[in-house]
Structure formats: structure tokens, C-alpha cells
Image (cartoon, rainbow, N blue to C red):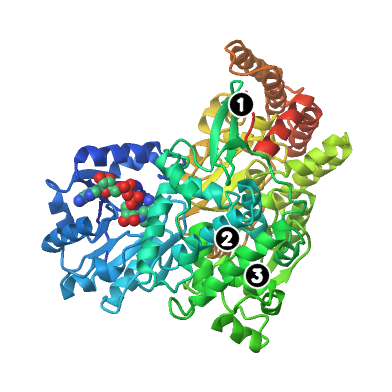
Amino acid sequence: MKIKNVVVIGSGTMGSGIAAQLCNANIPVTLLDLTTEISEKAKRKIFESRPPLLIDKSKIDNIKVGNIENDFDLVGQADWIVEAVVERIDIKHNLYEKISKVRKPDSIISSNTSTIPLKVLSEKMSKEDKKDFCITHFFNPVRYMGLLEIVSEETNDHKKISFLKFFCEENLGKGVIICKDTPGFLGNRVGVYAMQVAMTEAIKMDLSIQEADAIFGRPMGIPKTGIFGLYDLIGIDLMADVLKSFLKELPSTDVFHEVAKEIPLVKNLIQTGYTGRKGKGGFYRMNKQNGKKIIEAINLKNGKYTPSQKTNLNFDDKVTLQDLVSRNDKYGEYAWSVLSKIILYASSLIPKVTKDYNNIDEAMRLGFNWQRGPFEMLNEIGVKFFAEKDKQLKLNEFIKKLYDENNNNFYGKRQIYTDLETLGKVKQIARFKNDNKSAFTYEHKDYKIVEFNTKANTLDYNSMDALKKASNKNLIIINEGMQFSAGVNLNYVMDFADEKNWKAIEKFIHHFQMTCKQLKYSNNIVISAPSGLALGGGFEVLVQSDYVVSHTNIVTGLVETLVGLIPAGGGTKELLWRWMQSQEAAKDPDFAPQKVFDIIGYGKTASSPVEAMPFKFLLGRDKSIMNRNKLLSAAETLIDEKKSGYKPPTQPIFKLSGSQVRDKMFQSLENLFRDKKIMEHGMEVGKKLAFVLSGGNTTIDNELSEDDMYALELEAFIQLIQMEKTQARIKHTLSTGKPLVN
Ligand code: NAI
């Protein structure tokens, strides 16, 4: 069996996403729609999408387009035909009839439906077609969501289904979970139920939408969009359709019915065009006040909008679930009510919907970006605690059995859906050294693993300690959470800045530099295996590792100037050194400093390894991997390949022209200032960056060591952090999550 040619029918949100991911995997794909104009427009949207659906935009023309009238013969050449047209059974049935007539006998047909049962989709098919037909349920946006549910039946050719699973895992990088033909499969069945519980309980308990999102969010290990933010993101109208189909498919005894009733406020939002971010707004909306954009939140009682207020729950991010649900206030009550209902619902699905509860957890991780699924939550909170906390709670068979057996640690293996040796699996068996609060360290085989463990994996003194200690062995720095690292923990730095404790900041940055230096020059191989954000300090760790084994979905670069700082953990000097090795630099000593001045000055980022290469954020020696689950084993293989005779790199010597190149940089700053592209503070930041990149008070004949460059970075950083304007920028970023423009 092979898949060398794919046709995707329906070029809407999902069809485009699937076609783009096939293109990312270098599989020739044709996108068909009712007219070629529609599929051409879809192709343009793929090209312009943000975040980008393509890993390498230059490959866009590997996606061919056409229409179902004139180009249907292409279906006859396809190994896999993916149907992603509107959710209408009559249209889908018509299409299958047409496909059946032309498809190759050994081809696979699949539907991307999220709500129509497999048996309904295939009811008119011949036995032969049924064998080759399944549901491939991708999540939106296809490139970024890890989950693919394949729904199959007894009637299927199981070899083919296994092959398709392997193909999608290997080539499309998906976590593929095989599901039974039950409504909403696994992800949506539990995920949509969870959303509805979180919404209806918030209304019942009189919480504001911000309060609900603050609890049903980070404290529960759920993305910060929470419930109402997520509703806006998905589309309130789309959710209404999904609910209708659940109500139609599920028996009236299913408790899903209790949380899926139409809510007048929601109905009104849809009717007035408030369908979420794609519409006029939703539960949240953007408004203008005195020329300034502000976020407003809806009042669940009267439907009126007022400026959104941040909810302060007065606990840190690492609150345990037990502490959260034990709080003696409305927030604790809400958390318990929501959590207990989700756990009860998910466990009521065992074994009928799936016998593998672990698959539900993994579906929630991959499809909804939860840090842990309901069963892991139950295990963490403790079966005894769960069963005894609320006598009113009606336990189901699954939980009763665990409780009767006094089974408080029932959780077995993780990620049983894949045969790959994943980080999740290795963490369960590796020797665990919980050295410190900011990072976990594991020992496995002949290497160590460091996994950062803070909000967005931001870095502080402890994170560096963990890295430093772990570099006495071969080391893989990797993350199971969403981000490799969003950079230095600016809260941590600002706490010192508020006290004007510059010495403490200096100590931290110096520690950061010396840790990265150790990673680079230790006698052991250090591999960074990032996925998600690897920005600022996160990038500095990565760029000073020996190799990078990168997931294809990374966002990387040096963004310090956006908050009025410069990279001072070695990022400036390392990027400069990389550019000094280029051919252009051999001819012109000022080429590299000027190039890096632009890259760092504009805070350039790359959103894939392919985009990272032209900036030299990544090099040819680094690897890029489609499937996140393979990052650890790929890094391990690289260690095995390189460990014999490994020698750390030799230390570079920097020859820079000092004021000669600095003057050129200052000139370009003056131009930007004159054109009002930057303000005074931007000029200051630019000048400090120029000072470092030009080598400070040096001349071209002078030799600067790496330590000299580190010292220049540190000096510039300390001068910048002492500026009130920089502090204001950082505070703005910390409170809004966005840098100040200009
Ligand atoms: P969409 O409305 O964005 O796109 C549907 C496309 O199908 C349109 O371009 C339309 O012109 C085309 N189309 C309609 N009839 C056609 C026909 N006879 N032949 C060829 N093309 C035809 O829909 P979306 O959101 O992409 O959904 C597609 C499928 O994926 C549906 O079954 C939906 O349930 C499912 N799905 C949607 C998700 C989402 O988040 N939007 C997530 C997972 C599944």
C-alpha cells in the first residue's frame, strides 16, 4: 500500500488545512470544490493564513486546484480521497456515489465529518467501498492540532486502516487514535461536554465570564482561552450546530442533554451576528473608547458589554486540583462542580465508547490542548478524595469499582495509541530527579532530560540551575507542554527591577550566560528538541546547544527588542558568530553585525524550521521532525550517532570594526527615527544593540573573546532594564500578553 497522490474534496476550513498539511509532508495533493474559483481562493487563503498553515510557503504550488465537474478524473488517480465538504448527508452521499465509480480499487476514501456516524455515511455504499471507507477526523487548525481520530468499523479492511494510521502518524505528524463509531468520537464527546458544563455552571452559579475563564483555564491545566474565549474562537454558531447533532444522536438518557439545551443569550448572540472572533465579537468583543481599543466582556444576565476585568484568584499557577476544588468560595464550588461532572461523564463512557480511558485523556491533550485529561485529573485528585468529597455525587460503575478496591493509583501507561517511544512514556519509566521548582530532570538510558516546568516555560535562575547540573551527561532539553520556552521570566526580572536590585538581575543574567556556555562546551552532547515557542531566552538555550531536533511547528527568534531589551544570554553573540561564518562576511567584516542588527532589531521570528534557516536560527546540522511524539527518539538517535569521539566546539574569536560599523547602524536608526518608524526609546535600544554587535570600543585588528561578548551583552541589558521606558514596556507586555507597538 502506498499514498503518493491525494485528492481533497471541499476546500473550506478543513479541506484547506488537510491539503496544506499534505503539502507540508511533500505529498502531491489536489483540492477540488464546486468551482475552481472557490478552490483557488482557498489556496490563496492557505498562502496568507496566520498562523501559517504551510511550513514552507514556497511549496504552495504543490497544491493543485480544480472543480468537481471538469477535474473529477483526478479522483481516479488518487490513493486517498478525503471528503471535507459541508456537513450535509445528501451532498456527501452524492459525492460518494461519484467517487465509487472512478476510484482505484485499492484506494482509501475518508470523510472529515465531525458529527455524522460512519454507518450513516456509508449506508448506501457497496461492500467493497465500505471496506475502504472510514472517517478521518482532523482538528482545526490542521497543522497545529495534534489529534486525528480515525473511526472504523468491523466492515473495514483493517490492514488498510492500520496503514492509514501509520501514514498519518509518520507523514502528517498526527497523534492518531482509532475510535468506535459513537457520537462525537472521543475528543468532541468529552471536550464539548466539558465546554457545556463549564458554560452552564457559570450561568447557574452567577460567575462572570472572566471568572469562569480564569478557573476553567490555567489552574485546571486548560488553555487560557478558558470556556467563553474558546467559544468565541471556535464560533458560537458552529457550536450550536454541533450541539444539535449531539442531541439528535445521543439517547435522551445521556446527561449530555442536560447541558446542551438552547440558551436564550447564545441564541441572541448568533441572531445578531455575534458569532465569535470571525463575527462582530462574541462573549468578548473589541470596542473603541477615546480612540483606544478595549476588550469588553458580556454580562451573562443582561447581555450588556462592559470593559473586561482581570480576575485575581489569589493563587499561583501551580495550585493543585485538590486545593482548587477545596477552596471555600464560589470559585472552589465552580471548579468542583465542573470537574466532578467532567470526570463522571468521561468515566461513564468506559467501556462502551472506549475500553481505553487513556485514549480519552490523550484526545483531550491533542485535540483540546489540555495538560491532562479527566482520568489523569481523577488519579491526581485521588479516587478516595473524589468519592468522599460530596455525598450527593452519584458515582458510576467505573469509579465505584476503583473506590471499592481502594485503588488510588489506578493510572497505567500513557499514550497507548502509539508504538513510538514518546516523552510521555519515557517520563513514566525514567529515573526522576525533581531538583527544583522550574524544571524537571530525568535520567534515562545514558542521557538526561530537562523539561522546563513554569508558565509558558519561562526561564529563571532555577531553570538554569537544572540545565547546568544536567550537563554532566548527554542532555536532551524537551517539553511535553505547549511551549519549549517563551523566554526569560519577565515577572522574575521585574520583581528585582521594582526593588532596583540591579545586582540580582546581573547575577541572574550572568548565570544564564555561563549555563549556556557550559551547554556549548561541556564534554557531553546537548540537544534542544523544541516544539511551540522557542523565543528570546528559549532561543538562546537552543542556539547554544550542540544540535537542535526541532518539531516543524516552532516559533523561534530573538524578540527582546520588542520589550526594550537586547538578547543577553548569549543570543546576540551566537547569532553574530553564525553570520560571521557566511561567505559575505569573509568579504566584508561589517556584513554580519549589520545583518544581525536587522534580525534582532526588528525582532524577527520564524514559524517553522524552514523559515528559521535563512535567519541562521537553525543550521543544516539540525533536524526537523513532523511528529512531536518522535522528538525524543530522534534526539536520542542523534546522540548515539555523535557520541563516539564527540568534541565540544572551539571557542570563537570576534574581530569587529567598532565605531566603523556602529556609525552605519546609528545612521539607519536615525533614518528610522526620521521616518517615525521608531521613537526615542527605540533609538536607545537600537544604539545599545549596535554597541554590542560592533564589539564596543574595539577595532578590526583587535580580538574579542566569547566572554568579552557576553560582558558587552550583560552591560547593555543592565543599562536597558534600568530605563523607565523599558520597564513600562515590559509591564505592558506582562499585563496584556502583547508588546507595545513602537
Ligand atoms: P466549510 O464550510 O468551511 O467548507 C466546505 C466546503 O465544501 C466549501 O468550500 C464548499 O464550497 C464545499 N462544497 C460544498 N458542496 C460541495 C460539493 N458537492 N463538492 C465539492 N465541494 C463542495 O466547512 P468545514 O468547516 O471545512 O467542514 C468540512 C467538514 O469537516 C464537515 O464535514 C465538518 O463537519 C468537518 N469538520 C469541521 C471542523 C471545523 O472546525 N470547521 C472540525 C472537524 C471536522
Task: Please tell me whether mark 2 sits on a helix, a strand or a loop.
Answer: helix
Q: Is residue 176 visible?
A: yes
Report, in whole angstroms, how far the alpha carbon at label 3 lies from the one at label 2: 13 Å
Residue 355 relative to residue 203: left or right:
left
Q: Percent from the top left, x then y, of residue 131?
A: 23, 74
Which residue position is annotated with label 3? Answer: 446
Label 1 to label 3: alpha-carbon separation? 47 Å
Give me the residue at 36% from left, 41% from top: 46
**308 over 518 or under it: above or below:** above
Q: Position of residue 51 (x, y in %)?
A: 47, 42
Q: Which residue is mark 1?
A: 741
Between 67 and 479, the residue placed more toward the observer is: 67
**Beta carbon at label 2 within 8 Å of ligand 1:** no
**In front: mark 2 or mark 1?**
1
Between the residue at mark 2 and the residue at mark 1, the CA separation in whole angstroms equals: 44 Å
Pick the residue in front: 670 or 32. Answer: 32
Dots 2 and 1: beta carbons under 8 Å?
Answer: no
Circle 2: is it few (<14), some (14-19), or many (20+) Cα within 10 Å? few
The image's mark for residue 642 is: 2
